[in-house]
Image (cartoon, rainbow, N blue to C red):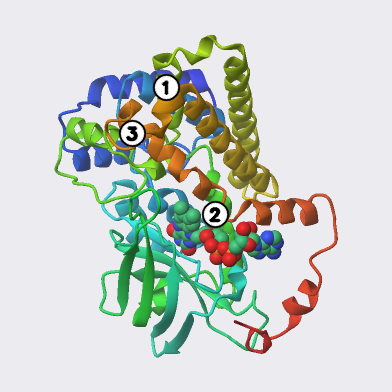
Amino acid sequence: MNLNNPEAVKIDAAQWFAEHWDPDMPLGVWWQLLADAGWAFPSWPEGFGGRGLSSGPTKAAIQARREAGAFGPPNGVATFLAAPTIMHYGTQQQQAKYLPRIVNGQDIWCQLFSEPGAGSDMAGLSTKAIRDGEEWVVNGQKVWNSGAQWAKYGILIARTDPEKPKHRGITYFLIDMEQEGVDVRPLREMTGDAAFNEVFLNDARIAEDDRLGDLGDGWRVAMTTLSHERDPDNAGMGETAAFGAVDLDMSVRDHSTSISSKNDGFSLALSGGVSKVLDDVTSQFDAATDPGTRQRLARILEMRRSARWSGMRAAAKIKAGGQPGPEVSTLKLLGSDMGREIRDVGLEAMGPYGMLYGEDAPTDGLFHAYSMFTPAQSIAGGSDEVQRNIVGERVLGLPREPGEKEQRELPWSDLPRS
Ligand SMILES: Cc1cc2nc3c(=O)[nH]c(=O)nc-3n(C[C@H](O)[C@H](O)[C@H](O)COP(=O)(O)OP(=O)(O)OC[C@H]3O[C@@H](n4cnc5c(N)ncnc54)[C@H](O)[C@@H]3O)c2cc1C
């Protein structure tokens, strides 16, 4: 097979799905099969659930899977943040230990970056890791950590040298969440769900072997993680639950039914499944015949295409071994805008029915759940204001914020903190 030819890849993938796809298979068995065949994440390296395909052939393979009606690979922090970062910076031992259990959905991961005093200013974080022989002892508090209550592992950034300037004294770790020193407390959101958490680290232990990247280089490693948040070649997007514990013994059929009936705006926003729900709303309320609504639907389509194009450029850069630049921030801003527009068009189409909540509401309450989640989209992964700062400073060449340059040079321990 010619790996650069999308048509050839599509034929090969279609044949494989025709032979192997069976919705009555247990989910864990299906995910293992997908990973072993390299069709789970076609752009990832061979041996790690992929075939090392470039963007065009990857899309062709995903298209073949969708046309076969086959269920997608696991999805969540493990696949779209942890795995690409481990592939980029991990030692062979780390890759062999963690990646196989990510691609077959065995392990759920969470992201332990934000802190009560360090969200937008993430480099100001206070959680400390102190070396103790062949281990690190970690103390501090993280917050807004999605899926931490189900996670087996976390990607963590912690301060290892308070005397260095704030960006340079941080190190990146892979932490076992199932240990005594890790206390996870779910937080209830306005959506009614409790998808994210506070995480308290009290003398939690991490082996030196689980340091990812060089000592003090955690900021650079964390930037790699963040740049992957919107990689469009992430084949899991679209079908599977973004967060939550999964029963790997359940049949794929039962699992996918339980997801589609899940009243969870977070999963819907991350999976892209909201387009289908918006279609349901506009057709149920006959809204697409209204010229104003049609215009706005066309705008949403346009935004989606622009986002896809911008994301493809970022992905191409990553594949070429580089780091995506500020286009990721424009993509993130587009995502926030698109979310708000989808919410407003859908709620307007529903009229008074848009006020209903829960399973009695149109689309079984799914659209309402999404609309309640929409504000979070412009905060998670870095707020809109912060993305605009990045575009202003790094694209347009505007001056940095007053005092920022000086702060970048001072030891973290000398910086003012609330
Ligand atoms: C749904 C959801 C899921 C999340 N999941 C995770 C997760 O899994 N792991 C994790 O680590 N974190 C997670 N987060 C946290 C997220 O990364 C932070 O909320 C975000 O970075 C903003 O930080 P903050 O909440 O501390 O707000 P702050 O930084 O306190 O900001 C408050 C306000 O001030 C504005 N602001 C701050 N600094 C500037 C500036 N320099 N210029 C202009 N305006 C500024 C912000 O835009 C915002 O409007 C999640 C958040 C959400 C909403």
**Relative to the observer, which residue lies in front, 33 or 239?**
239
Total labels drawn: 3
Residue that badge 1 annotates:
281
The mark lying in front, picked from 3 and 2, is 3
- Confirm if mark 2 falls within 8 A of ligand 1: yes
Amino acid type, mark 3 = Gly
| Ligand 1 rendered quadrant | bottom right
Amino acid type, mark 1 = Val
Amino acid type, mark 2 = Gly
Check disc 1 and report its element: helix, strand or loop: helix
**Relative to the observer, which residue lies in front, 397 or 20?**
397
Q: Is residue 414 above or below residue 359?
A: below
Residue appearing at x 79%, y 57% in the figure: 393
Q: Quadrant of the N terminus?
A: top left
- Confirm if mark 3 falls within 8 A of ligand 1: no
Residue appearing at x 31%, y 22% in the figure: 69
Residue 131 located left or right of residue 298: left
Which disc number belongs to residue 365? Answer: 3
Instruction: Give residue 120's position: percent from left, percent from top.
Output: 61, 64
